[in-house]
């Protein structure tokens, strides 16, 4: 029988950390990548966010809800990167 946590650790901070990392990666890619390669680099950046999500969620050593936390991290990262890339895409249309 498992002993329940007396004071479970907060997990929202790790999820939001992945979202912030995704925003930073998307902005860096949007600034430095050419428009032709931006989509490919965003996929690589999302893969990096997946590795970071695994590492961040494994760090506390808490197994309860691991899959849900990683899924929330990745869903948020995909949305954040999508919105930022949409902004760069619209800016390229207006400027071009």
Image (tube, rainbow, N blue to C red):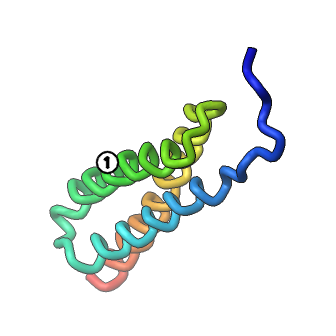
From this viewpoint, which residue is outermost toward the top? 1
**Does residue 34 lie above or below 71 as drawn?**
below
Which residue is at the front of the view, 91 or 5? 5
Secondary structure under tag 1 reads helix
From this viewpoint, which residue is outermost toward the right? 6
**Does residue 25 lie above or below 44 as drawn?**
below
Which residue is at the front of the view, 85 or 64? 64
Measuring 57% from the left and 35% from the top, which residue is drawn there?
A: 66
Instruction: Describe residue 18's horizontal placement relative to residue 93 as left or right.
Output: right
Q: How many marks?
A: 1
From this viewpoint, which residue is outermost toward the bottom? 95
Q: Position of residue 23 (x, y in %)?
A: 45, 68
Q: Position of residue 29 (x, y in %)?
A: 28, 70
Picture quadrant of residue 15: bottom right
Picture quadrant of residue 62: top right
- Quadrant assignment for the C terminus: bottom left
- Quadrant assignment for the N terminus: top right
Q: What residue did someone put label 1 on?
A: 47
Tell me the crowding category of disc 1: few under 14, some 14 to 19, or many 20 or more residues within 10 angstroms, Cα based. few
Measuring 56% from the left and 47% from the top, which residue is drawn there?
A: 60
Q: Position of residue 90 (x, y in %)?
A: 40, 73
Measuring 65% from the left and 31% from the top, which residue is drawn there?
A: 64
Measuring 37% from the left and 74% from the top, which residue is drawn there?
A: 27
Which residue is at the front of the view, 75 or 51? 51
Instruction: Describe residue 27's horizontal placement relative to residue 40 as left or right.
Output: right
Q: Position of residue 32 (x, y in %)?
A: 21, 78
């Amino acid at each position: 029988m498992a002993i329940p946590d007396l004071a479970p650790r907060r997990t929202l901070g790790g999820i939001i950390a992945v979202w912030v990392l995704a925003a930073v990666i998307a902005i860096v890619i949007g600034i430095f990548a050419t428009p032709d390669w931006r989509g490919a680099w965003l996929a690589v950046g999302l893969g990096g966010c997946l590795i970071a999500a695994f590492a961040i969620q494994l760090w506390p050593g808490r197994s309860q809800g691991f899959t849900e936390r990683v899924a929330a991290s990745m869903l948020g990262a995909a949305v954040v990167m999508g919105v930022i890339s949409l902004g760069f895409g619209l800016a390229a249309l207006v400027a071009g």
